[in-house]
Image: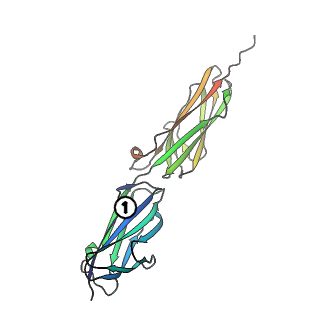
Amino acid sequence: MPTADLSISVTDGATSVAPGTRDTYTITVTNNGPDTLSSLTLSDAIPAALLNVSFTPSVGTYDVVTHTWSGLNLASGQSVGFMVACTVDPTATGTLTNTVLVLPPSGTTDPTLGNNSASDSDTLTPQADLSVTVSDGKTTVMPGTSDTYTITVTNNGPSTVSSLTLTDAIPAALLNPIFTPSVGAYNVGTGVWSGLSLASGQNVTITLTGTIDPNAAGTLANTVTVTPRWSGQQCFLRKSEDVGLSLTRRAGLLRIAASR
């Protein structure tokens, strides 16, 4: 009976990956002999967090249903490569582990099964480039009247954001401020905006309504800052590419003098 000691390795060349990005695994199968193989069985236990998976063998043909890799001429001492390209689920968290298994074809004996399986593990490190705009749609406001700012937060990706921190440096001249988010819940004390599912390319809004101090004069400036916030025990904010963008909307204050 033919004999072939197969071994396998798998790597994506990284120790951490960002949800929502593309990733590519390189699988290498080596025949440690003694006999040449024309086919083998290669199984990849694709984790649920990997989407849009494609398989590309360096030589021969791979059947994704039977996991048969045929059309080989793998002699003792030779290796063949196999590429697995995919997208990491933008909502994925925790650790991503991809495990592969290689076996010789039926009728061929593998004397050493301990080297027939390999795994690659990466820490999932969310990243989100958030941007923010704020506007009350005006260039002048009248003291003593109500004013409403619309704050829009956009996620430029790649990872989905479930919560963020929105800080609004509410000017002293804006009295009785009330925040109303379009979705989720906003904590005025901490600035945490939770209950989101903000995917790459999407945006959410929150309105700030208040009354302009009747005695205010000069210029009213409202500045907001936004940063992503990762829940759970693993906090990757320090690795995030988001730097916190601030935009200021200025509106001149028109004072109406009382007639004498």
Which residue is the site of mark 1? 12
Please determine whether, in this image, residue 199 is positioned above or below residue 36. Answer: above
Please determine whether, in this image, residue 81 is positioned above or below residue 142. Answer: below
User: In the rendered image, which quarter contains the C terminus?
Assistant: top right
Instruction: Give the residue displayed 33% in from the left and 70% down from the top.
Output: 28
Q: How many marks?
A: 1
User: In the rendered image, which quarter contains the N terminus?
Assistant: bottom left
Query: Within 10 Å of the Cα at label 1, are there few (<14), some (14-19), or many (20+) other Cα atoms?
Result: some
Give the SS element for disc 1. Answer: loop
Give the image location of residue 106, x and y in percent. 34, 86
Please determine whether, in this image, residue 110 is positioned above or below residue 27. Answer: below
Say which amino acid is labelled 1. Answer: Asp
Q: Is residue 131 left or right of residue 60?
A: right
Give the image location of residue 128, x and y in percent. 48, 48
Toward the top, the furthest residue is 260
Give the image location of residue 187, x and y in percent. 52, 40
Toward the right, the furthest residue is 260
Instruction: Give the residue displayed 43% in from the left and 56% down from the top.
Output: 93
Image coloring type? rainbow
Judge whether residue 179 can be spotted in this image: yes
Please determine whether, in this image, residue 112 is positioned above or below residue 90. Answer: below
Give the image location of residue 234, x and y in percent. 38, 50
Instruction: Give the residue displayed 44% in from the left and 78% down from the top.
Output: 63
Judge whether residue 49 can be spotted in this image: no
Toward the bottom, the furthest residue is 1
Query: Quarter-wise, where is residue 174 in the image?
Result: top right
